[in-house]
Amino acid sequence: IISPNATISLQAACDLLRRIIRILYLSKRLQGQLQGGSREITKAAQSLNELDYLSQGIDLSGIEVIENDLLFIARARLEVENQAKRLLEQGVETQNPTQVGTALQVFHNLGTLKDTIANVVDGYCTVLEENIKNALDIKVLTQPSQTVTRGGPGRAAMPTPGNTAAFRAALWTNMEKLMDQICAACGQVQHLQKVLTKKRDPVSHVCFIEEIVKDGQSDILYKFWTAVTQTLSSQFQSATDSSMFLKQAFEGEYPKLLRLYNDLWKRLQQYSQNIQRNFNTSGTTDLFAELQQMEEDAQDIFMQKNEDYDPEKALKDSLQQYEAAYLSKSLSRLFDPINLVFPPGGRNPPSSDELDSIIKTIASELNVAAVDPDLSLAVAKNVAKTIQLYGVKSEQLLSTQGDASQVIGPLTEGQRRNVAVVNSLYKLHQSVLKVITSQSSFPAAAEQTVTTALKAVHDLMGSAVQPLLNSVGDSVEAIIITMHQEDFSGSLSSSGKPDVPCSLYMKELQGFIARVMNDYFRHFECFDFVFDNTEAMAQRAIELFIRNASLIRPLGEGGKMRLAADFAQMELAVAPLCRRVSDLGKSYRQLRSFRPLLFQTSEHIASSPALGEVIPFSIILQFLFTRAPPELKSPFQRAEWSIARYSQWLDDHPSEKDRLALIRGALEAYVQSVRTREGKEFAPVYPIMVQLLQKAMSALQ
């Protein structure tokens, strides 16, 4: 009977023997695999992995039969690892997915995939950190030549006078080179990640990327990019903190720096799009066929923005302080010429040359910022502030005294200055408009920002001329209302023509408008702006003319002829106020449509197609009162108002409903008066007016 201890020893001896036999077999197989070179390298790694397993938990030292084999296995492991590292390096550098896939399979078989990838990525990060430091090394940048000359103790490195241009040139060359280095490193990490995402172990079918990201690890590209962007931020910060020259270069030429970053970002995105195509055009081995069959992985971080992480923002975070400084200096450059041409106590707007200088500065700032949409928008906001400042300074020059709105004598000093200010604002408005329309690919938000500021300039021009427009409008109304001082009750002369071509008030109106346009408005250079305002005045003048013409009582046959002549002359009177009288739209059509009604019967007038459509019912009803006997009082007579007060009431009540209600009151009062005096019949025009009033009221419904 064998004791239990002896049984255990026997089992251990058998186990050891089995291991030794297997080690000898695998060692021999490994020798053959190593002779097969890179073709057999993954199988060699598999053998090494099994040999590792056989050596676990047991002491194999001192066993002569496998002593040489163990030494060979240790050397073989080193050789396979080095060969795989070289293969990985070469594959990543030449973007060859087959080589990279083979190397990764070796590390997977050796059980060191995760550590190897971590070391590779850390290696890239370390190299880039060194590259960033070198690119920003002020000592290297300020060297007059390649030979390093030692400064005296405590001497700070700085460009020698007159050598700043060389320093800047060297800096930008370094920055371009740095962007190339970052791009190349990113490309290699992206390629590595792509192969990891596609490659599966042929035995276990585990995807290699799952090996890397298990335990909640982030993917390697994200880890690498986070490290690079953080290094950029910290290195830029410390470099510019310790060198005023670097700080000034990055702040002063920030758009140049931003353009380099934008170009880098575009290249990274472009590379992400092309990487699949590169896969499809390189490698012809079985491994490549296997790679092609793998599923498409999700887009990498350069192609999609995550809610939690924006890789482009992470890249540009290192630029924030320089952008803020650049925008502050940009605003100063924009404000300085304005503060210069509006000195304290100055009374005149800038000259044409001074304004040109301001516009050139605006154009220059926008052109330089065109490298980036966000920078364009930020500079556009500065331009908007500049336009606002110009507006505020111009407004302070405007004369608001009584002489600014006088229309009796020649142009006063205040009016002359107001004209100059409006012309200056107009030039600014047009010039800036031209600048923004000539910008290629100007962001819509930036354009909107500047356009809003320009609208404020246009509004300021409007408020600058408003007092003058009000004065002219008041005078026009005062002249038109004097038609009621003239006698239109006369009968027709023997010749059948009016005695004079037009009434006195019309002559005065024509003379006044012609003089105002010549004395005051001719000096404005913004013709369209002036006409936009004076055309509104012309429409108002026609409205007042028709209103007052419809109120004339009594109106004889001779008076009708003279009034008809006034209608024709009215077109000539308002002509200087507009581009073409026919452009006045509805007002012009009313003027033309009303004139023939003077000679038509009341029945004809009531059925005129112009009613309601062109001429309001209230105007026609007002006019029909002139054909009634004195007992049928006009609304203003019944209310015992002057014509001026009635005209004011009509302005305050533009609604047709209110006006018709007042007319209805006058008609009802007439009916009451006829009944009171027990009259037998109403005036012939009364039923026509009632019918017309009903038609007007139903049209309102």
Image (spheres, rainbow, N blue to C red):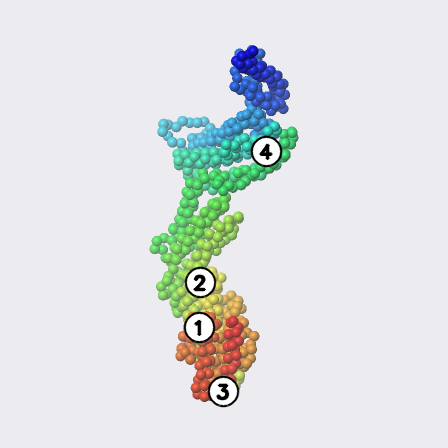
Could you tell me the amino acid type at mark 2? His
Tell me the quarter of the image containing the N terminus: top right
* Cα–Cα span, label 2 and label 3: 62 Å
Work out whether mark 2 precedes mark 4 in sequence or the reverse, and give the earlier one: 4
Q: Nearer the viewer, mark 3 or mark 4?
A: 4
Work out whether mark 3 precedes mark 1 in sequence or the reverse, and give the earlier one: 1
Pick out the residue farthest to the left. 345
**Residue at left offset 63%, top offset 31%:** 290
Could you tell me the amino acid type at mark 4? Lys
Could you tell me the amino acid type at mark 3? Glu
Q: Is residue 662 above or below residue 416?
A: below
Work out whether mark 1 precedes mark 4 in sequence or the reverse, and give the earlier one: 4
Q: Is residue 486 above or below residue 17?
A: below
**Residue at left offset 58%, top offset 32%:** 207
Along the line of sight, which residue is nearer the eye, 155 or 633?
633
- The residue pinned by badge 3 equals 681
Give the numbered dot on residue 198. 4
Pick out the residue farthest to the front. 1
Q: Secondary structure at mark 2?
A: helix
Asked whether the viewer can see residue 209, the reply is: yes
Q: Secondary structure at mark 1?
A: helix
* Cα–Cα span, label 1 and label 4: 83 Å
Q: Nearer the viewer, mark 2 or mark 3?
A: 3
Q: Secondary structure at mark 3?
A: loop
Q: Residues within 10 Å of mark 3 (few under 14, many from 20)?
A: few
Q: Quadrant of residue 184?
A: top right
Q: Is residue 670 above or below residue 196?
A: below
* Cα–Cα span, label 3 and label 1: 31 Å
Q: Is residue 260 above or below residue 541?
A: above
Work out whether mark 1 precedes mark 2 in sequence or the reverse, and give the earlier one: 2
Q: Nearer the viewer, mark 2 or mark 4?
A: 4
